[in-house]
Amino acid sequence: MNETIETILNHRSIRKFQDEPLTEAQVHTLIQSAQSAATSSYIQAYSIVGVTDREKKKALAELAGGQSYVEHNGHFFVFCADLYRHAVLAEEKDVEITPALESTEKFMVTVVDAALAAQNAAIAAESMGLGICYIGGIRNDLEQVQQLLETPAYVVPLFGFAVGVPRDNASTKPRLPMTHIYHENTYDADRARVHEEIAAYDETIQAYYEERTGGARSDTWSEQMMRLLQKNSRSYMKDFVQNQGLNRR
Amino acid sequence: MNETIETILNHRSIRKFQDEPLTEAQVHTLIQSAQSAATSSYIQAYSIVGVTDREKKKALAELAGGQSYVEHNGHFFVFCADLYRHAVLAEEKDVEITPALESTEKFMVTVVDAALAAQNAAIAAESMGLGICYIGGIRNDLEQVQQLLETPAYVVPLFGFAVGVPRDNASTKPRLPMTHIYHENTYDADRARVHEEIAAYDETIQAYYEERTGGARSDTWSEQMMRLLQKNSRSYMKDFVQNQGLNRR
């Protein structure tokens, strides 16, 4: 196993960082890494906003649900789906591209593009000995994020990304069995198999939490998922995204 | 610069592979790498379908627009947004999660999850000396992909991913200027800046194509983008995704 794969397999989310800012060179390397990811038809449909302003970081930490590591870290990025530059170009050149800009297809493209870029930054950071945490919590209130960062039309902030020198030693979390994620030639939708594999996985997860918490937490993946999905959080998202001009048709 | 970052910065899409299948161990490593990526609230909302069946690969190559490297490669994967297992669990436990399953928010989560996983597989593959190419072309006809792979409700195939021993030496493609992708604290939406930066980039791209093709191709990024976006391809996507039960509300 080479060092890169070791880095990849060793991923864990870091939620405590030293209060030590990244160097300019480090930030540069992370963005360059992000930009090196594949991009659909060369479209490069994303932007990254680095947030260093203390007040803005504090506001983001609060709206993300009081996550201190959004405020305290080495650097904080917000990855955005972005077709703004394309819209500006089209207006300049007087070319009609609204149907494409507003399409579900292009929305998917922007989200994939942004995520591929972010994951490159994640692996690059981890290979440098830094830790990272994706912050979906910024989606609690994208109206406010948009105001804070002044993102224009055709831009949707997707997630935050905290990076820094780790100050905790979280452990890797067990994933669903590979046989459950990976199918060969045909998707195996057999419910009995789903049931069986998730039941076994639930036992793994229960043991994982019990061991980590000295028995204080006993939780399964299924239970977590049902709690998460019963909530239907962020139900404003459709309107927000459509107001930005994306995912409309 | 460490080896991992070298690998990341050295990315180029490979469109010619040796007809040499990946070993089982290699496939295993790629999936394990994919699964090690961060996942929103532990939701693990994606699946990967490996396609080895000759007829299926041929059919996918055709529907992707006659891309031979979809058929001829070391291994072909299809990455899918997937909330099927969550839907099955909820039915079993008699828990109502339909609003969440159908939400734009959760659709975004599944797409991000799948893309993060895929990019881990990409970097892992490239670190092993393999080449990769993302295949958005499978989205030309997801109805047919769905039939070929038998994906159930709450699953949307997002993109293909060809991997194998490279048989061409494509070069890395210049990206938009970093200043254009990266903003600090505030998104700089100034149109004059967008215009200026893209004009400079267009010159870079024109020189790049002219050099690579001995002057035969003279094209700018702007021109490419306008051609791409005027087409509004795959306008069936909204209906397809919503028929799968996702991105409905």
Image (cartoon, coloured by chain):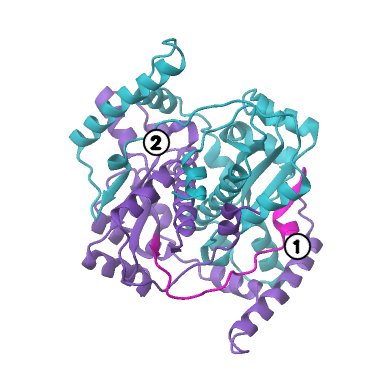
Chain colours: A purple, B cyan
Front-most of residues B237 and B120: B120
Identify the amino acid type marked 2. Answer: Leu
Residue B206 lies left or right of residue A11; in this view the side is: left
Q: Quadrant of the N terminus of chain A?
A: bottom right
Q: Quadrant of residue B149?
A: top right
Q: Residues within 10 Å of mark 1 (few under 14, many from 20)?
A: some
Indicate whether residue A182 is drawn in magenta. Answer: yes
Front-most of residues A146 and A176: A176
Q: Residue at x 37, y 29 (%)?
A: A97
Numbered tag placed on residue B203 in the rendering: none
The residue where tag 1 is placed is A194
Whether residue A133 can be seen here: no
Whether residue A231 can be seen here: yes
x, y percent for residue B85: 68, 60
Counting the numbered discs, the total is 2
* Magenta part of the chain: A161-187
Q: Are marks 2 and 1 in contact (CB under 8 Å)?
A: no
In this view, B168 is above or below B104? above
In this view, B86 is above or below B49? below
Q: Residue at x 60, y 37 (%)?
A: B132
x, y percent for residue A233: 46, 66
Q: Give me the chain letter of mark 1.
A: A
x, y percent for residue B151: 71, 47
Residue B10 lies left or right of residue B164; in this view the side is: left
Q: Residue at x 46, y 41 (%)?
A: B9
The residue where tag 2 is placed is A101
